[in-house]
Image (cartoon, rainbow, N blue to C red):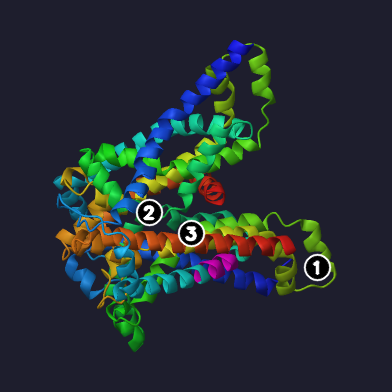
Amino acid sequence: MNKKISERNITHFLFTVPNLLFYSFFTVLPVFSGIYYSMTDWNGISKKYSFIGLKNYVTTFTSKRFFTSFWFSLRYAILLVLCIVLISTILALLLNTKIKGQGIFKTIYFFPAVLCMMSVGLIFDKIFYFGFPELGNFLGIEALSRNILSSSKTAMFGILLVNVWKSCSIPTVLILSGLQTVPVELLEAANLDGAGHWQQFRSIKIPFIMPMISVVMVLALKEGLMLYDYILVLTGGGPAGATESITMTLYRMGFEDMKYSLAIAMSIVVALVIIVISLLQLKITDKKRVYE
Amino acid sequence: MKLKKTEKIILYIVLTFGALLIAVPMYLTIVSTFKTDGELMANFFALPSAPSFATYKRIIAKGEYFTALKNTVLITGCVLLIEVLLLPMFSYPIARRMNSSRYYKFLYLYAIIGIFIPFQVKMFPMIKLLNSLGLANRLGLIFYYLGIQTCDGVFLINGYLASISDELEEAAYIDGASTLNVFFRIVYPLMKPIIATMIIKNGLWVWNDYFSPSLILAKSRAWRTLPLFQYAFKQESYTEYAMLFTAIVLSMLPIILIYVIAQKQIIGGMMSGSVKG
């Protein structure tokens, strides 16, 4: 018996080794070496560099570019979360009715989720360039006839539109699956009591979909803060830096401006903020669930 | 809940309008591949006057599309093949022993903490590391995915195993089965649903990723994946609109085919994947 158990211990241990190595080497090690490099003045190429302590972090907090792009990303992420939660909840409510063709609608609404951001970005880039102005001219709407990506006031909304087009799919199906856990008896009882759609939604459905909405919020927030692909394709950060997201700033600082160690210090600050926001968000939505 | 007739009509109108919002960009993309650049600029919404497969022939003749397709299939395939073996092996002992052993408890926390670390922190040192190892290539990209997908994978599989009792395994141990036998004959088959979820979620992630390959595979055109191929197309031939649309359509084609065949599994997999991960 003892021999058996030690054989099991060894096999289990060996099971964990290969993946542990990949993870330690290609995920954990870079984080630690990143923390180290953030305290040097290395430019990413030269052989010599020296230790400068927390100077990069001081520079981070006095960098206007850092705050401008971080502020852009935050605003963008909040808008994205609002749009996705609102649209997905409405779509899920509409799909959660007894109608013919529900399966087809579900297939269509889920479709954007499998596409790659690069394709979607490229397609909409051309739609903004050719399609909207043509539509604007045809309908005589002047606001449409200019490419919304070319004005620093409206470019963010163009990017947001593309992102929402692609990213509502999974949340919709998630919230739909939450709605399907609502007990039918509860809804029937409410119906008998004469509760309207809105009342039923507010007092019966929301508690059941709250866990899904909190998942959706965390995912959308993370997606919004990491925004890169769409910006690269649609605006390149322009016009005049108006849509430069934090990820794009970090990329350019590190690989184009040769401020490698500063870029890492900034990325660590961003990481800490993202971690704090995610934890806060989880805590708030968790509480809401319990009290309801 | 019963709907009134007018409510039903409004519902259909809204749902159809939404479906059109998704369908129209796809329609425009496909139609544009059959037009000339002049037609595209003059009338973006109209049907082509003389549709032909000329742009498709030109792109296929260039050969870069198939190189990119091959790279994407190769990288996604390798990552998934290794993961379906390594991740369950890694997660199983953790799930079963984290409450009795400090080593496995540590492994669990060690793997989970990675979920909270954003990509930006890893990206610079990662490139540096891969460069210094001579791994800034397709193999390095595969290793990178294997590392980074550990966190979600462990979380996902662990949650699933916690819902399955270990009675079957214990009975097999008492009958004298070896650990390897128990894992591959009993536990692994039980894990099939969660492994399918993982394949779908991680497969789409690797297949569609642009940022990491753009950093790691920057050195050679021959390593380009489909997302890189599309972006390069925009950069290099930005005035050939019909060609660009064709490149996009060809790049989307494989994943669309897979979606048409296996949409139920894909929707299910993506959902349970994102709830737990």
Q: Secondary structure at mark 2?
A: helix
Query: Mark 3 to mark 2: distance in Å?
Result: 12 Å
* Residue at 49%, 47% in the rendered image: B113
In the rendered view, tell whether residue B239 sits above or below residue A22.
Answer: below
Residue under circle 1? A191
* Residue at 35%, 38% in the rendered image: A25
In the rendered view, tell whether residue B249 sits above or below residue A67.
Answer: above
Residue B268 screen position, x and y as percent: 55, 46
Query: Mark 1 to mark 2: distance in Å?
Result: 48 Å
Structural crowding at the residue carrying mark 3, measured as other residues with C-alpha within 10 Å and reported as few (<14), some (14–19) or many (≥20):
some
What is the three-letter code of the residue carrying label 2? Answer: Phe
Question: Mark 2 — on which chain does it sit?
Answer: B
Check if residue A222 falls in the magenta segment: no
Location of residue B71 (image quadrant)? top left
Main SS category, magenta section: helix
Label drawn at residue B119 = 2
In the rendered view, tell whether residue A50 sits above or below residue A73.
Answer: above
Structural crowding at the residue carrying mark 2, measured as other residues with C-alpha within 10 Å and reported as few (<14), some (14–19) or many (≥20):
some
What is the three-letter code of the residue carrying label 3? Answer: Ile
Check if residue A86 falls in the magenta segment: yes
Q: Secondary structure at mark 1?
A: helix
Q: Are marks 3 and 2 on the same chain?
A: no
Residue A181 screen position, x and y as percent: 70, 54
- Which of A108/B136 is in front? B136
The answer to whether one can see residue B236 in this image is yes
Range of magenta residues: A83-91
Residue B35 screen position, x and y as percent: 22, 63
Label drawn at residue A275 = 3
What is the three-letter code of the residue carrying label 1? Answer: Asn
Q: Secondary structure at mark 3?
A: helix
Location of residue A70 (image quadrant)? bottom left
Question: Mark 1 — on which chain does it sit?
Answer: A
